[in-house]
């Protein structure tokens, strides 16, 4: 057996022995791997210590020696540059060529280096196609294809045309190694290559020796041949990447100019061999591999991780089997081909197959038909059993390249073929017998026709003489499918009197018709006479005349070529220009994505949306309705997908408002009826439809421009011709509406405890894995997905991959039978779709559809050539779609059940059991989650049945629609009220300031300790004043209590930071929506994670923002969060007040206070209990109060979680006759709350339990749906503001629970905002009760009785809270409260101090060091109270200004200083003594630290605290270790002590020197693009201010010094500080980002060194900053501020 095929004449005369381990390898770099002719190689010079040789061609220098270390250094210098995504492979090559030309014009000065360019290209870019299209007399080697398929790829998967893999051409770097000497261990590669991550891969072979002179190979354990391709295409499930690599080394490999020439040679061949459709090429190429053996493996390794890999094949397989592939082909030279698993083993010679003696003419014709189909790329055959079709069946089953599947049900079989074509974009071939077998294909043929899906139908038939004479199983099959096929072909019965060319050309013509626009099914009727079996019958071979050439190759007889330039091309361009002018003139354009079938079209549509920047209405069938994002849901995406438009249009007011002046629709069909109606209502307006078929899709007769074009071509035209208008004000309006509807839908669906069908629609996408596909049934499942499917899901794809793609998100391939929209054949279609698309498929369907196609389970069980799939059946025991239609409201239920719902009790489980298919039944949310999670990861098919019911489904859908309609109306009223036509939606912030107040209280707060000896109690807090440029002012209060777990110092730090962040920012009119709008604004505008803001600070900030917006519009806070008609808004808006008693006295004392409160008019009183060790006195107090105040006063108790379960139960049982409305937080363990309710029957209110929830709040609240939990007490300042409070309140109201807003002893200023918010919730609750037809609930008394504690007022005027005799209660009026807030004026007597803004000083310091003179730019703010000075050191490319927000926060009690390091920002090299200007001074670590020390000496004579980030962290650490007399402590953020291993130091040194060279040669823009493309910055790239941060890095103007800093301060050059850490006496605080795995590991190791080896018992723990990566101070600055503050205060 020959394991390697070289060519058809040459094979290897030996058998490969089993793979053996090796010990040492040698690294060889090929001078030129691109051969114009067979190369001449130098021989290895074997020595005791082998030395690698350079393998070169005639170009360049003579052969020189390059050892392994030098080679590894070269590979590790690689700089990767990401280029923007493109629409085609050709465009990808062109954009890479442009990038290379750019470097060519500014060549790097470094004598060695490597550049790598990568660009995302559409999924249609196929590696195998490209490999097969390479010319036979190739000028470039190596050429290779290696499969990416993980699940046992076969040669037949190649013929199906769906194999993903890698294609490479040329070689930028070659690694070759001779066998190791017995005495040597390890690998030359292993020692030198760094462990840093990269996308670069090396491909090749282990345990072989490549003789470069004889161009032969032989097995040699330990030898290897690896290479990095010059150009490479790597396919993933739904995206492909094109890479190009340039590598040079003047001393050994080649010059930069020669490297470019090598690339250009490979580029020319690659560019001219690009193909779009290579099914035929693949078929003709597979025959070339039929002499290869099948037990050879090709390997692919991460080129920069080889130091971790011992290049021993057995060891590598054990560590990572995925590195090896057994399906590949590699052409290493004109005469050397290695291949495996690319053909059928022991394949019959093709010529013999075609010329063998067929027993009869039927067999010949059938074989010719099948053979021609395979040559046309049609290799998937769907066969129904039958006698008359025997010749076709035998021919298809016998062909070496076909994949065949059988089914007894022709209807299911046809739908299966339909699904295959949907998934693969090429037709399957159906073979059936005659008679009704043909008729059973009709439904699938109709669907294929309506949906433009290609299909080839081969129907066997009786000969003409047996038609219409009563012959068995004979019907008239001529034109059987009528107009539903693109063409009907009727072959004559096989005859040797007819040339076989007629058979071949008929097949060619038919397939051309099926696959040309408009694609669809074709029907070839094939009459056969007897004998049908392979019974011998003489036939004349003259019918084969003229087929010699055809039989000598593997190409089809007739090749149909479609010209790109049609005769009407000019006319088409004229119309496109006309459409372009309409697009340019649009003010309110809308882009609509309808049904999109191809992944390439999804890709193009996404790029179109990215460029056009119009609002996008997206149908679920487009694949872009259900999207996966890499970054936060709060990101304000450039592309505005209006996912909830269908639900927004439930609102009449939104529907009237939502008008467009130009509509572009991509893809023909739309699922949502309301969207179609909206488009119709927009007309007359320009309505442009783009789809790649000529058929009419215009049911409303409104399309004005019908463009017959591929989506890619239309997108390319528009990108080249149209520059978008970035100032679309209406877009932000729509964003606010969509955000509101999305919030409401998500909240309502997730708040429901039971498992509902809309919940299923959301969860299916959240659980589907990247690279999977969805297939939707018709009726309710596809509609629910379209209306309620999740619009944001965290991508599980590799972050670097997503970043490299340049796309904000990726969709999921979605399909369905929406051509005729029938419910038949869905299982069969989905199984075929899974085969065709080669992905895991999740089919979502209803129970009636499932029952309609149970024969499809037989196809499912066969598991032919596909990955596992999951069928999710929503079983509501009937056709629930009819319950949503008008017929359900006018028809008797019995008629509905029998004739519409078709109610049934069929067991789906038993059907699955009968077919041997796994079945899982789910009834709860948790069970659904578990089932989906497990099924997506198992290696088998599964049916997941979701129990539902028609009536409950109708009710839930109805309520959901009503709630969404109400929310949409509410949002529109807010936005309309706040938006004046043609005015801005944004308000510029002028400034923000705060004042510290201190007021006297009448008594300590209920949160204060009663053991205090002070006679006077005070309340302290801050009042925020937010000034807008239009003169409006908003006020907010921040007053933390003990219950906040905050203090004034922490709060003030955050306020100072926020003041800085607010400078020059804007607020917009969407913020009062309170539906994630404020969280989104905080993230996108302030650039800080919303959860990092202290709850009281966020509450006060929201209060100030909302009151500022209200002030701008001359109205109240209530009016902007709950607008009402003018006449209604002027009516009183009462808010009842609940009094508060802190019951430390005797029961009689408490009762006395209560009676006085009742006398004042209070009708509700809350009594604090659990103030004592036992509940006895509290029991007595409650009883006494009830006795004193009578039965009509509402009593509440509040235990503040201070009782044990037994104590709480004792209390509840004892006061059961006292009619408490509820008790707040009775038990100290929240897990006992529901148990308490069930045992005692006493109603419970939640308070502290909800205070800690920040994320997944609805999931947390689920366990408290219990009816015994009757109320939710919400303190906005504790829960984190009005937006968080609104979310919890909405949940409570939806579940019928009382919502009580409570103060936390805020002053009248804070109370005025809370009163308005409480009124908003009261009104909202009334509206909700009307929606759900529920009885109105009693008026809620809110917890604002704390106002009675205040002896002094923060404001000059008092808030009016009074007894209203008309309502017989104490209340406040929300309108009056709103006017109070807007006219707020602080009482100057209680203001301790006011903070306007810290003054920032900026100055220059002259410093001399190392013979050079520097002018160092310094910024400073704050004054030290206790002598503390904090000095901040920035990272590479940063400046001292990076620290300004953090410095302002820390300047409360410290002097904060930052300065620009040499080469950065405003620091300048003034003079370098004795050296001309072309040279730079030494800027090594010692020199820079000397500069730092001298700056510190200039600044202060005292010790300082150093805070350093990245490069600055290394400098800070080195300074702390060297000058401990000057450093009091150091905060090391994302820093490293250096490298210990000398080889790794050399590698890093080389990399940084090449980086520095590139920076100087190509400028900062080029450098920063490549710098931030590295994986280290993946998290930072997701920051909303990343573009601004990156642009700030372009401000440096001294590139020579900057490059010198990068080179001289390289971690490869600086001394390692690991050993010095053992002796470190300076306190260190290590800070890292949660997502920064590399530096987290470094920090933990540093802590170990500092602690265990330095004798420090309790070293400061490593602080991991959440929601951040490497640049923690930019990504989550508030958390960094807290950590620095904690370190500064450590001594106190």
Image (cartoon, helix red, strand yellow):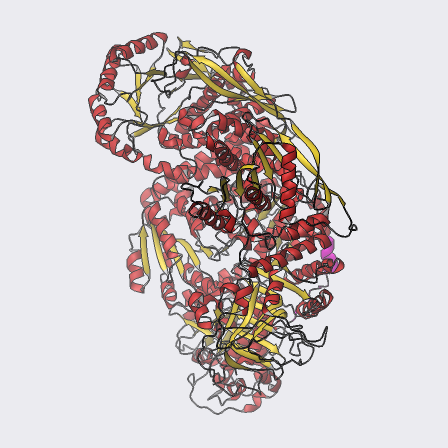
Residue 1534, above or below 871: above
- Residue 432 occupies quadrant: bottom left
Whether the magenta-drawn stretch holds residue 1540 is answered as no
Residue 1403, above or below 516: above
In percent of the image, x 50 and y 89: which residue is there? 356
Q: Nearer the viewer, residue 483 or 760?
A: 760
Whether the magenta-drawn stretch holds residue 574 is answered as yes
Residue 837, horizontal then vertical, whole percent? 49, 63
Q: Is residue 424 left or right of residue 1213?
A: right
Tag count: 0
For residue 150, say whether it is visible. no
Residue 1120, horizontal then vertical, whole percent? 53, 25
Residue 1068, horizontal then vertical, whole percent? 59, 31
Residue 689, above or below 474: above
Residue 1124, horizontal then vertical, whole percent? 51, 23
For residue 344, say whether it is visible. yes
Region in magenta: 561-575
Q: Nearer the viewer, residue 1051 or 951?
A: 1051
Q: Is residue 1439 left or right of residue 814?
A: right
Q: Nearer the viewer, residue 880 or 355?
A: 355
Q: Is residue 1623 left or right of residue 637?
A: left
Q: Nearer the viewer, residue 1598 or 1258?
A: 1598
- Residue 729 occupies quadrant: top right
């Amino acid at each position: 057996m020959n394991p390697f095929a070289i060519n058809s004449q040459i094979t290897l005369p030996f058998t490969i022995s089993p793979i053996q381990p090796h010990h040492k390898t040698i690294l060889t770099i090929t001078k030129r791997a691109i051969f114009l002719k067979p190369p001449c190689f130098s021989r290895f010079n074997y020595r005791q210590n082998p030395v690698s040789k350079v393998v070169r061609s005639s170009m360049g220098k003579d052969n020189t020696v390059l050892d392994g270390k030098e080679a590894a250094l070269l590979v590790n210098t690689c700089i990767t540059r990401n280029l923007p995504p493109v629409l085609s492979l050709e465009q990808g090559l062109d954009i890479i060529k442009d990038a290379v030309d750019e470097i060519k014009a500014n060549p790097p000065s470094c004598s060695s280096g490597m550049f790598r360019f990568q660009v995302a290209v559409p999924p249609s870019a196929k590696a195998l196609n490209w490999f097969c299209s390479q010319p036979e007399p190739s000028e470039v080697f190596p050429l290779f294809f290696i499969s990416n398929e993980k699940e046992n790829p076969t040669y037949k998967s190649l013929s199906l045309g769906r194999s993903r893999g890698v294609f490479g051409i040329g070689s930028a770097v070659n690694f070759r190694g001779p066998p190791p000497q017995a005495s040597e261990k390890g690998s030359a590669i292993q020692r030198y290559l760094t462990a840093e991550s990269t996308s670069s891969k090396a491909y090749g072979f282990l345990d072989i020796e490549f003789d470069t002179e004889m161009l032969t190979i032989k097995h040699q354990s330990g030898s290897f041949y690896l290479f990095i391709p010059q150009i490479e295409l790597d396919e993933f499930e739904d995206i492909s990447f094109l890479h190009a690599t340039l590598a040079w080394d003047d001393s050994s490999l080649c010059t930069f100019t020669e490297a470019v020439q090598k690339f250009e040679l490979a580029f020319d061949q690659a560019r001219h061999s690009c193909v779009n459709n290579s099914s035929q090429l693949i078929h003709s190429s597979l025959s070339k591999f039929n002499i290869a053996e099948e037990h050879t493996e090709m390997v692919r390794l991460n080129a920069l991780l080889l130091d971790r890999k011992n290049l021993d094949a057995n060891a590598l397989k054990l560590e990572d089997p995925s590195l090896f592939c057994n399906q590949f082909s590699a052409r290493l030279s004109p005469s050397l081909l290695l291949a495996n698993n690319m053909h059928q083993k022991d394949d019959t010679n093709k010529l013999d197959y075609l010329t063998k003696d067929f027993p009869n003419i039927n067999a010949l014709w059938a074989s010719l038909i099948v053979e021609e189909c395979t040559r046309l790329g049609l290799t998937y055959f769907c066969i129904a059993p039958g006698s008359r079709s025997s010749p076709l069946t035998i021919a298809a089953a016998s062909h070496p390249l076909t994949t065949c599947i059988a089914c007894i049900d022709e209807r299911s079989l046809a739908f299966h073929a339909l699904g295959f074509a949907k998934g693969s974009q090429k037709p399957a071939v159906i073979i059936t017998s005659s008679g009704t077998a043909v008729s059973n294909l009709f439904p699938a043929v109709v669907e294929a026709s309506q949906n433009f899906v290609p299909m080839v139908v081969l129907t066997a038939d009786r000969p003409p003489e047996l038609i219409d004479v009563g012959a068995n199983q004979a019907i008239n099959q001529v034109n059987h499918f009528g107009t539903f096929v693109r063409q009907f072909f009727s072959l004559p019965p096989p005859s040797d009197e007819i040339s076989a060319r007629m058979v071949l050309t008929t097949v060619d013509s038919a397939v051309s018709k099926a696959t040309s626009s408009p694609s669809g099914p074709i029907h070839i009727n094939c009459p056969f006479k007897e004998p049908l079996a392979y019974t011998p019958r003489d036939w004349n071979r003259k019918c084969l005349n003229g087929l010699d050439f055809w039989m000598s190759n593997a190409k089809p007889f007739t090749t149909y070529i479609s010209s790109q330039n049609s005769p009407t091309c000019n006319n088409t361009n004229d119309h496109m220009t006309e459409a372009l002018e309409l697009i340019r003139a649009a003010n309110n354009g809308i882009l609509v994505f309808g049904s999109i079938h191809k992944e390439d079209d999804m890709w193009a549509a996404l790029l179109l949306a990215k460029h056009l920047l119009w609002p996008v209405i997206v149908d679920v069938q487009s694949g872009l309705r259900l999207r996966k994002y890499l970054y936060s849901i709060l990101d304000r995406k450039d592309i505005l997908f209006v996912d909830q438009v269908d639900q927004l249009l439930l609102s009449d007011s939104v529907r009237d408002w939502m008008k467009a002046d130009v509509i572009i629709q991509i893809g023909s069909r739309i699922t949502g009826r309301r969207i179609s109606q909206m488009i119709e209502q927009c007309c007359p307006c320009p309505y442009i439809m783009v789809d790649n078929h000529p058929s009419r899709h215009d049911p409303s007769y409104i399309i004005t421009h019908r463009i017959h074009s591929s989506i890619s071509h239309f997108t390319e035209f528009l990108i080249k011709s149209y520059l978008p208008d970035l100032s679309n004000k209406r877009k932000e309006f729509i964003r606010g509406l969509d955000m509101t509807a999305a919030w409401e839908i998500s909240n309502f669906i997730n708040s429901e405890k039971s498992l509902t069908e809309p919940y299923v629609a959301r969860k299916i996408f959240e659980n589907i894995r990247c690279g999977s596909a969805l297939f939707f049934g018709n009726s309710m499942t596809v509609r629910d997905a379209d209306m309620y499917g999740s619009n944001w899901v965290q991508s599980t794809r590799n972050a670097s991959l997503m970043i490299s793609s340049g796309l904000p998100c990726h969709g999921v391939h979605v399909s369905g039978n929406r051509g005729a929209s029938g419910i038949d054949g869905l299982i069969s279609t989905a199984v075929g779709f899974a085969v065709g698309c080669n992905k895991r498929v999740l089919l979502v369907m209803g129970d009636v559809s499932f029952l309609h196609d149970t024969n499809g389970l037989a196809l499912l069980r066969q598991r032919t050539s596909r990955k596992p799939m999951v069928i999710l059946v929503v079983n509501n025991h009937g056709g629930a779609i009819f319950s949503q239609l008008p017929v359900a409201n006018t028809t008797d239920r019995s008629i509905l059940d029998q004739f519409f719902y078709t109610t049934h009790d069929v067991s789906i489980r038993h059907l699955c059991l009968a077919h041997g298919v796994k079945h899982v039944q789910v009834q709860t949310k948790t069970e659904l989650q578990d089932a989906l999670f497990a099924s997506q990861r198992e290696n088998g098919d599964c049916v997941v049945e979701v129990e539902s019911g028609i009536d409950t489904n109708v009710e839930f859908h109805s309520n959901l629609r009503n709630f969404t309609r109400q929310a949409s109306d509410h949002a529109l009223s807010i936005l309309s009220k706040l938006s004046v036509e043609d005015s801005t939606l944004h308000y510029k912030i002028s400034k923000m300031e705060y004042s510290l107040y201190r007021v006297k209280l009448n008594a300590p707060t209920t949160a204060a300790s009663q053991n205090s000896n002070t006679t006077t109690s005070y309340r302290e807090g801050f009042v925020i004043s937010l000034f807008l440029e239009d003169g409006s002012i908003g006020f907010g209060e921040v007053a933390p209590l003990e219950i906040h777990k905050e203090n004034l110092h922490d709060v003030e730090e955050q306020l100072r930071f926020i003041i800085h962040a607010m400078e020059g920012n804007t607020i917009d009119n969407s913020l009062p929506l309170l539906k994630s709008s404020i969280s989104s604004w905080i993230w996108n505008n302030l650039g800080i994670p919303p959860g990092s803001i202290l709850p009281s600070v966020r509450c006060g900030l929201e209060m100030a923002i909302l009151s500022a917006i209200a002030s701008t519009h001359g109205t109240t806070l209530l009016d902007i969060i709950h607008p009402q008609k003018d006449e209604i808004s002027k009516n009183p808006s009462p808010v009842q007040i609940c009094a508060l008693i802190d019951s430390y006295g005797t029961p009689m004392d408490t009762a006395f206070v209560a009676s006085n409160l009742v006398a004042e008019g209070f009708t509700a009183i809350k009594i604090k209990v659990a103030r004592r060790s036992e509940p006895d006195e509290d029991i007595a107090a409650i009883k006494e109060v009830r006795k004193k105040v009578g039965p009509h006063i509402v009593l509440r108790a509040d235990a503040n979680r201070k009782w044990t379960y037994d104590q709480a139960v004792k209390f509840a049982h004892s006061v059961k006759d006292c009619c408490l409305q509820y008790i707040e937080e009775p038990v100290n363990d929240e897990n006992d709350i529901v148990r308490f309710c069930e045992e005692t029957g006493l109603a419970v209110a939640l308070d502290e339990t909800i205070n800690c929830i920040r994320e997944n709040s609805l999931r947390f609240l689920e366990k408290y749906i219990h009816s015994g939990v009757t109320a939710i007490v919400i303190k906005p300042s504790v829960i984190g503001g009005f937006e968080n409070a609104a979310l919890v309140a909405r949940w409570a109201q939806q579940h019928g629970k009382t919502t009580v807003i409570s103060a936390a002893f805020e002053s009248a200023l804070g109370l005025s905002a809370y009163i308005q918010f409480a009124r908003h919730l009261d009104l909202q609750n009334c509206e909700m009760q009307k929606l759900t037809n529920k009885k109105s609930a009693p008026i809620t008394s809110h917890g604002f009785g704390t106002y009675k504690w205040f002896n002094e007022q923060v404001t000059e005027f008092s808030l009016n809270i009074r007894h209203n005799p008309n309502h017989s209660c104490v209340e406040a009026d929300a309108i009056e409260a709103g006017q109070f807030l807007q006219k707020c004026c602080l009482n100057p007597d209680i203001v301790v101090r006011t903070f306007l803004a810290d003054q920032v000083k900026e100055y220059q310091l002259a410093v001399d060091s190392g013979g050079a003179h520097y002018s160092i730019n310094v910024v400073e703010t704050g004054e030290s109270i206790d002598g503390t000075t904090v000095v901040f050191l920035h990272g590479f490319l940063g400046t001292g200004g990076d620290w300004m927000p953090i410095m302002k926060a820390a300047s409360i009690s410290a002097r904060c200083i930052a300065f620009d390091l040499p080469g950065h920002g405003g620091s300048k090299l003034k003079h370098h003594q004795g050296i001309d200007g072309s040279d730079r001074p030494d800027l090594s670590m010692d020199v820079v630290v000397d500069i730092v020390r001298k700056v510190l000496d200039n600044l202060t004579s005292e010790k300082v605290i150093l805070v350093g980030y990245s490069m600055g962290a290394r400098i800070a650490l080195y300074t702390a270790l060297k000058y401990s007399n000057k450093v009091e402590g150091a905060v090391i953020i994302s820093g490293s002590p250096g490298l210990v291993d000398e080889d790794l130091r050399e590698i890093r040194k080389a990399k940084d020197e090449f980086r520095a060279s590139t920076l100087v040669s190509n400028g900062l823009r080029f450098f920063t693009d490549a710098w931030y493309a590295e994986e280290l910055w993946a998290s930072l790239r997701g920051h909303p201010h990343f573009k601004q941060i990156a642009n700030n890095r372009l401000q440096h103007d001294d590139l020579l010094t900057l490059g010198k800093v990068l080179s001289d301060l390289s971690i490869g050059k600086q001394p390692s500080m690991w050993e010095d850490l053992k002796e470190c006496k300076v306190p260190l605080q290590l800070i890292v980002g949660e997502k920064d795995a590399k530096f987290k590991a470094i920090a933990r190791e540093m802590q170990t060194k500092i602690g265990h080896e330095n004798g420090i018992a309790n070293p400061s723990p490593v602080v991991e900053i959440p929601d951040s990566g490497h640049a923690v101070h930019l990504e989550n600055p508030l958390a960094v501020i807290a950590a620095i503050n904690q370190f500064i205060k450590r001594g106190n």
